[in-house]
Amino acid sequence: MTRLHVGNALEAPLDGIAEGYRRWRESANTDQCPVRGVLDRIGDKWTTLVVITLAERPHRFSEIHRSIPDISRRMLTQTLRELERDGMVLRQVFPTKPPSVEYRLTSLGESLLKPLAELVAWAAENQPRIVNARVAYDAGRG
Amino acid sequence: MTRLHVGNALEAPLDGIAEGYRRWRESANTDQCPVRGVLDRIGDKWTTLVVITLAERPHRFSEIHRSIPDISRRMLTQTLRELERDGMVLRQVFPTKPPSVEYRLTSLGESLLKPLAELVAWAAENQPRIVNARVAYDAGRG
DNA sequence: CGGGATCCACGCGGATACTG
DNA sequence: CAGTATCCGCGTGGATCCCG
């Protein structure tokens, strides 16, 4: 029920992550973890794809939809709304006819690209090892 | 239907993430994106918490459960199995009575801590901005 | 202690139709 | 074009019981 806190490993980014987490968790304030909220968004099915798409340049709604064919308009709208609400994306409406709407990353949104890119890099770099591990694991079960 | 590919932004980690993604997407091989699979895991509700818990030291099953009170044993087992299958976690059984099982990060699992810590750091660092953005956004709607 | 098996509720998200 | 509204299937995951 109470959501766990993911501690700030800021002061000791690498080795300190676990201790920072533990200290945070044991600290008084045990409800509502802001970091968890952010991580949930990252892990969201579409958020990262939209952010990466907008990293290149501003896009209109339909452009994003064409870039990510297997997202429904419903989910694209919802994802964009949440990103806008979080201050990651700026929505700009042009009173043309038919109306056009442009989405672009804010500076906050762009700042996310760096850690995101490193995570993607890690994934791409280690994916062969993961695949091998899976094959080995599955082989041991028939 | 066909899953999108998140391109390797390896060659140009920061600015190149979008172009790399686009080139990857436009390339021949359009089904099955390995990176998406990894990102889905990261975004998984429990995976990161378990990894962070194990970052401190090896833990027994019940220890992890105590560290993350709001995970069910079912989900903890499932999360640990997937991490084991992906070669991120090593499961070691000791034939004591009652039996004890120890989980520890593999080197692959530990290598994930670095990008993960940076993401957590970003989240902690920018969370106030996100909260402010949400308040401002919600205020504009009543 | 460390799980597996089963049942079931709920929310995510796709499909579809409609609007400004 | 850029959404909104409604309906609904299905997977995720909690609760519970059982086992070695």
Image (cartoon, coloured by chain):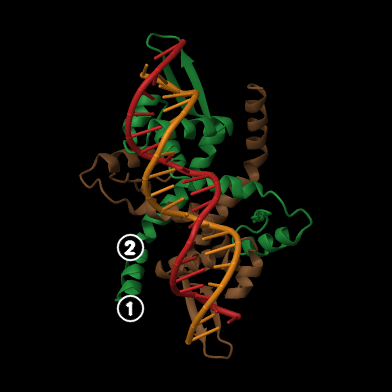
Chain colours: A brown, B green, C orange, D red
Indicate whether B137 appears above or below A51: below
Whichever of callouts 2 and 1 sits on the residue coming sooner in the sequence is: 2
Look at the numbered disc 1 and give the secondary structure of its residue: loop
Regarding residue A115, the answer to whether it shows in the image is no
Q: Residue at x 46, y 52 (%)?
A: B119
Q: Which residue is mark 1?
A: B140
Q: Residue A23 placed where, x, y %?
A: 28, 40
Instruction: Give how far apart the Cα atoms at labels 2 and 1 are.
Output: 19 Å
User: Chain ID for label 1?
Assistant: B
Tags 2 and 1 on a common chain: yes
Q: Type of residue at label 2? A: Pro
Q: Residue at x 52, y 41 (%)?
A: B112
Report whether A40 appears left or right of B31.
left
Q: Type of residue at label 1? A: Gly
Q: Residue at x 66, y 36 (%)?
A: A131
Q: Which residue is mark 2?
A: B128
User: B68 or A112, which is in the foreground?
Assistant: B68
Q: Residue B11 placed where, x, y %?
A: 68, 56
Indicate whether B42 appears above or below B88: below
> Badge 1, how many Cα within 10 Å: few under 14, some, many 20+?
few
Report whether A72 appears left or right of D12.
right
User: A25 or A18, which is in the foreground?
Assistant: A25
Quadrant placement of the C terminus of chain A: top right
Q: Quadrant of residue B54?
A: top left
